[in-house]
Amino acid sequence: MTKIESWRTLVLPEVRDAISDDVARIIDSGLLRGGPHTRRLEERLGVDWNRHAVVVGSGMDALELILEDLDLVGRPVLVPANCFVAIPGLVARLGRVPVPVPVDPVRLAPLIDPGTVDGRAVVIWIHHGGMVGGHAEAAIGALRARGCLVIEDCAYLLPGPRPGSGPGAWGDVTIMSFAPTKPICGSGGGAVLTRDELLAKRIAARRSHSGQEHRWAVGDSIYRFRGMSEIEAVIAYHQWEQRELLRACLQCVAETYQQALPPAVVMPGRTPQATQSRYAVHLPHPMPDLRERLARHGVASTVMFDRPWFDYPTLAVHQGEEGWGEVRDLLVRTLFLPFHPSLSTADCMTVADALKHCLLAEDLER
């Protein structure tokens, strides 16, 4: 039985050749960090986003460097309830208590009334799975007008030909990730995109942990390297250049799923967007063993989060049950199907048939 992976990186033959040539030159040069390929990627991202770009070791490094630069004392930090626990964990490590935000069940986007938010707040706005809420641009604009600083997390966003006018360009600062499971994928790395040139310079200066004795001398501390290798920069650069092909391939996959999937798992209003890099279905009821059942059919699947981040004891944030039942229900009923540019129509039909079979079996058992 052929296994259908939840994610598989697509690198075109011509892109592979360009990457190989660049990597050979890097090895010949002996300059594996901080060289011309790192600068080339920063310049390209900066031009396309119309922002100041700094490439770093990962998407989490990007967020950490931004938060370290901010004075968070007295500032609430708003974090969507449905996110990777390390994100509020960073906030807690810096001595603040993250504040959970409810989410829109259709696009999994934060639901924030800007009129009720403290103007000193820092808001981490996450475009989950690359889905962009219809209210996102207006809400981010209103939050900024109120005085809030908005960080857009675009790790799973698949930008279009003019990213500087779309999601990721609405907030004050944006983070990207180039990890293998992300839409602009490589072996690792990430980026910070900011309107603030001085912020970009400060983040670039904090990427390295060597030569930082002057920071320790005044009470600051940097423990590790958070930069990007030249080889990672090469792969990310070429993947960024071919993103329009990736978008076209994923659009075909999404359209096939839309036609083949049972209506019971399609959330009303959740139509595919060109920005998406994950394909979420909404289960009729919680099915804890569904992923194991699909795996027996050769279909790998993922859950982004199976509980709100504040349910983890590590964060020591007690929210209680009241008011968060809908978020918990949404998360346990959300499943991500295989969704990558290498999927064929036959693969999509196999996934849809396997899901139908598992749903039918569950209904019969109930």
Image (cartoon, rainbow, N blue to C red):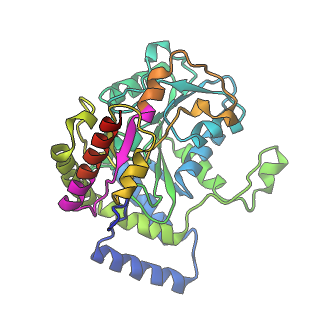
Q: Which of 358 and 206 is in front in this view?
A: 358
Count the labels in the image.
0
- The location of residue 67, given as percent across then percent down, is 62, 39
Q: Is residue 98 inside the magenta stretch?
A: no
User: Where the N terminus falls, by quadrant?
Assistant: bottom left
Residue found farthest to the right: 217
Residue 82 in the image: state x and y as whole percent: 48, 34
Residue 219 in sight here: yes
Query: Which residue shows up at 39% across the image and 56% down it?
Result: 295
Q: Where is residue 195 in the image (x, y as percent from the top left)?
A: 46, 41
Q: Who is closer to the viewer here, 142 or 110?
A: 110
Horizontally, residue 316 falls left or right of residue 362, namely: right
Asked if residue 171 is positioned above or below residue 275 in the image, the reply reads above
Q: Is residue 220 left or right of residue 20?
A: right
Q: Is residue 81 above or below residue 145?
A: below
Q: Where residue 78 appears, x then y in whole percent?
A: 55, 27
Magenta part of the chain: 331-351
Q: Residue at x 48, y 64 (%)?
A: 39
Residue, far top: 116
Q: In which quarter of the image is the C terminus?
A: top left
Report if residue 282 is visible in the image.
no
